[in-house]
Image (cartoon, grey):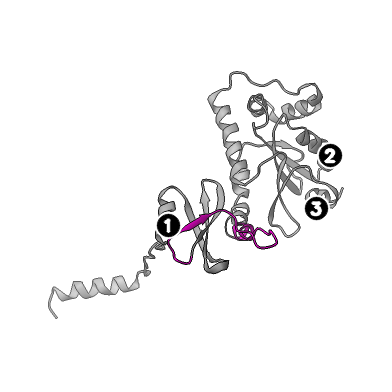
Amino acid sequence: MSRLARPLIAAGLLLATLPLAVAVAAPQWPAPIRNLEGKGLTIVEAFDAPGGMTGYAARAGNRPLTLYLTPDREHVIIGPMLDADGKNLSQEVLDATITQPDIQSAWPKLEKSNWVADGDDDAKRVIYVFTDPNCPYCHKFYEVARPWVESGKVQLRHIPVGIIKPSSPGKAAAILGADDPSAALARHEENYSRGGIEPLEDMPAELREKVAANNMLMSSLGIQGTPGLVYRNAEGKIDIHQGMPQGALREEIFGKK
């Protein structure tokens, strides 16, 4: 065996022991879909759709939406598909492919967000609450939650946002920027009927960014109103409820008193 052959054989044996890396080509979408992808849409998954069409679950920024490619593969329809009874056939697909996966991966983002503690750090149940300081339903939720919070069973983690009124961002910043944000939140709620906390008129850039980040996180989870609640249900899965919970749902979210 030649001296040149020995290192070549050795190199071949070494390569054979390395993990095999297989390059996976990106899907080659039909032209109308590629065109939309080039304009900023993110295509998540293709699926079979009625009428011989092919559906695509996609994102436009944080907003999920469906695309439907016609059988001739030359045209695309954007938006929900309804059946003869008016049922939205697109929503189930978007929930399964985009919304639920996003929600289930959201908890670490919530933990790292700009939240204000309300309740015992050792509470067994944690509920994240997107709260606008000017929201009357957020104030009502705060009051309704007192028995669970004060008993030590629930900790609310309020994520102040500024969306309802021009003063909302300033009030959210005033709570987040206080020396004791939890005490500031409590004072705001206690004085809600008298206007609550005074908004910061000249917000430092750091606080402005925190409020903006909270607003963006709320939007990314598809929450469109306050209070927006994110919690773990009885199966341990992350769930979202928008608005003031009523009846049996209240106990499902808070647990038993």
Tags 1 and 2 in contact by the CB under 8 Å rule? no
Q: Is residue 32 left or right of residue 81?
A: left
Helix, strand, or loop for circle 1?
A: helix
Q: Amino acid at mark 3?
A: Glu
Q: Residue at x 76, y 58 (%)?
A: 234
Q: Which residue is mark 2?
A: 144
Tags 3 and 1 in contact by the CB under 8 Å rule? no
The quarter in which the N terminus is drawn is bottom left
Q: Position of residue 90 (x, y in %)?
A: 61, 58
Q: Amino acid at mark 1?
A: Pro
Q: Is residue 15 left or right of residue 122?
A: left
The tag earlier along the polypeptide, 3 or 2, is 2
Q: Which residue is mark 1?
A: 32
Q: Which residues are magenta?
A: 71-96
Q: Residues within 10 Å of mark 3 (few under 14, many from 20)?
A: some
Q: Residue at x 20, y 73 (%)?
A: 8
Q: Quadrant of residue 14?
A: bottom left
Q: Position of residue 93 (x, y in %)?
A: 60, 61
On whether residue 106 falls in the magenta region, the answer is no
Q: Which residue is mark 3?
A: 252
The tag earlier along the polypeptide, 3 or 1, is 1
Give the vertical position of 53 relative to 13 (above or below).
Answer: above
Q: Position of residue 120 (x, y in %)?
A: 76, 40
